[in-house]
Amino acid sequence: MTVLYGADYNPEQWPADVWDEDVRLMQQAGVNIVSLGIFAWSRIQPSEDVWDFAWLDTVIEKLQAGGVQVNLATATASPPPWVSARYPETLPADENGASYWPGSRQHFAPSSPTYRRLAGELVRRLAERYAHHPAVVMWHVGNEFGCHLPMDFSDSARDAYRVWLQSRYASIDVLNDAWGTSFWSQRYGSFDEIFPPRLAPYSHNPSSMLDYRRFTSDMLLECYLMEREILLAAGATQPITTNFMGPFKPADYRRWAPFMDVIADDCYPDPTNPNRVRDAAFQRDLVRSLKRGTPWLLWEQATDAVNWRPSNPGKRPGALLAETAQSIARGADGIMFFQWRQSRAGSEKFHSAMLPHAGTGTRTWDAVTDLGARLAALGDLPAPGRDARVALVFDWESWWAVEERDHPIEIDYLALVLEWYGAFHARNIQVDVIGPEEVDEGYDLAVAPVLYLLRDEGAAALSRFVEGGGTLLAGPFSDIVDTHDQFRSGGFLTQLGPLLGVRFEDFGALGGVSTGGTGVGAQTVRAAGAGGTVTFDLRGASLPGGIVAERVHAVGASVIATFETGLTAGSPALTRHAHGAGEGWYVATQPVAEGLDAVVAAVVEASGVRPVIDALPAGVEAARRGDLVTLINHGDDRVEIAIEGTDAETGAHIQHVVLESQGVAFVTAPVASRAAAGVLEPSAGDEAAASVTAAGAVPAR
């Protein structure tokens, strides 16, 4: 089966006489699957006692006759107006207790029993009608859970939170101990005294905030699981999933992943973001790593401009292919868009689509049909294996905890992780993005930036990794608190200190951190103030560091770099310690720019990890999945890359490829293949050697 290729399809927005044209044009574009009915609840159930499936039957029959498969949505993401009018208790609330009202989407309290009852009945009827329909090959549960409502403070949430806490802690005394409620006279006498963290005069208890984020993620997951169980009870055998949104803070996707038959993700790189290639690569590596060794599906991307940023420029020529290739290179077997036909009305009418409002005689239509034709001509893809030898530790609970108030300094966790990721991405070194508990002997190097909250299981896995021969680089502000956001007895670095060979004394916060946008909800961090950045000496070079300049002491570790300036001048900035068969490195500041690059260079050299291809020109990205190497030229210059292998599209033996700007090549090449690269001047008449290959059936449950 060829790569899945298609889009969200919303026929309910259009008269029935458009549907035949839609199917005909889908065939022309190479579409073989659509996500159907995502926001169709009000059309399926116009009132509580009225159901209308006739139109949906007709659409599915037309799609099936046209050779287009259906990823059928459960339609629960946006309740019709009659739901909130008849059942106002389904509405969510903000931290002031004020209701969010209908008129947009996602206007439901995930913990509301009434919402769950009504949504469950909708799913049951859909499942009973379509679970065995041959055109339905996948189920799309909800849509982007939590996207517009990251936290609900309603009375439904209050009641569910109390039940959740009682299940987690069993007794109120255990909860009081876990939350440290003796501070500020917060001690609770019963679970009924606990409320969501609504508007308060000052800081909320950080342990309670951490649990409320866990609860929020779990309530969204419960909604998904409720719908999944209904589908299974009706006999559905198709894969069941929902669409993730990359590094989305409100939902701990690592906890969700075991319940997804296949990971699906929505990714919208910002054309104005100078780090868009890095940030999108990180997102794709993250979602692939949620089910290592299993292909994933890109469920939404834009054909051209979006509508929801302050400025919405379109893509440069060739960018659609380059962005698609980045997904395929990093494990995707499905390429989908929002949406098929551009809306004529509503909030997203300015959002691009496969079929623009301006019609088929457009640059966008040419781009999507060309892409569809290339994808349809290609063979099977190898499954993404354990190609990465570097593990980048990314943990949702640590993210939640480190960004609460009242810390030595405000930290943008995702921004710092992206900076560490970028140093490996720029070297074309393959990276998996995983939790601390998942670090194992399959990696040579693990990097753990700002792992503020470190669970016992994660610390044990990192220790086993180093003792077994791995190299661990831990960043500052790590191993500070336990799973309840409390300090452990004995100070800081109590779990990792022995394998790092250091003792932690003080945080050494640097003031005046400024930020700038980088996309996917992230920010680049540049430390300033309090005398500017600190500097540290590494191999005779004076390099900058920011955020903190911690005071640590070497206890068995070798001091590789020392601080030159600030209150910690003369103390270790970077250490290295042999432990078991491996070694632990610790950097006591957040290296900035060339400082971070120098630290990564040192640990890469020590661990022996290698890039996919050596010495590529700036702007050229390389990634590997099995024997398939993908090369993408994101730069402006024409380049030639010497790589021996097989053109994955034509089957021809090649020794080099030539890529224009935004050009792509897919090459089947053994791991030991020789590779080199260089920049070429543009030459009229030369053709870029580029191919697009991707395929794979819908993964089975």
Image (cartoon, rainbow, N blue to C red):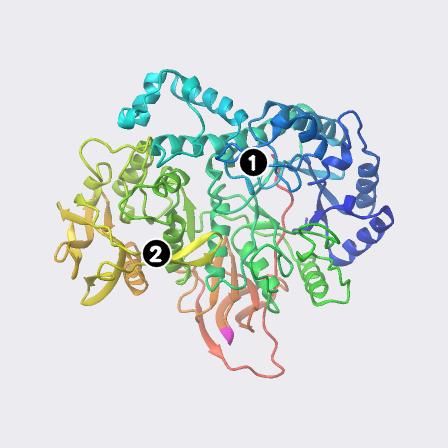
Magenta span: 636-640
| Foreground pick, 558 / 636 | 636
Q: Is residue 527 above or below residue 209?
A: below
Amino acid type indicated by mark 2: Val
Q: CA distance from mark 2 to mark 1?
A: 32 Å
Tag shown at residue 506: none
Disc 1 element: loop
Residue marked by disc 1: 260
In this rendering, position of residue 382 left or right of residue 394:
right
Q: Quadrant of residue 37?
A: top right
Instruction: Name the residue at the front extreme.
Output: 201
Q: Is residue 639 magenta?
A: yes
Residue marked by disc 2: 609
User: Which percent across, then down, holds residue 601?
Assistant: 30, 61
Q: Are marks 2 and 1 in contact (CB under 8 Å)?
A: no
- Does residue 236 appear in this view? no
| Foreground pick, 199 / 240 | 199
| Mark 2 or 1, nearer chain start | 1
Q: Quadrant of residue 212?
A: top left
| Residue under the point 56% across and 36% down | 260
Q: Nearer the viewer, mark 2 or mark 1?
A: 1
Q: Tag 1: Cα neighbours inside 10 Å, few (<14), some, or many (≥20)?
A: many
User: Which percent across, then down, holds residue 131?
Assistant: 72, 30
Q: Is residue 233 above or below residue 319?
A: above
Quadrant containing the C terminus is top right
In this rendering, position of residue 409 left or right of residue 612:
left
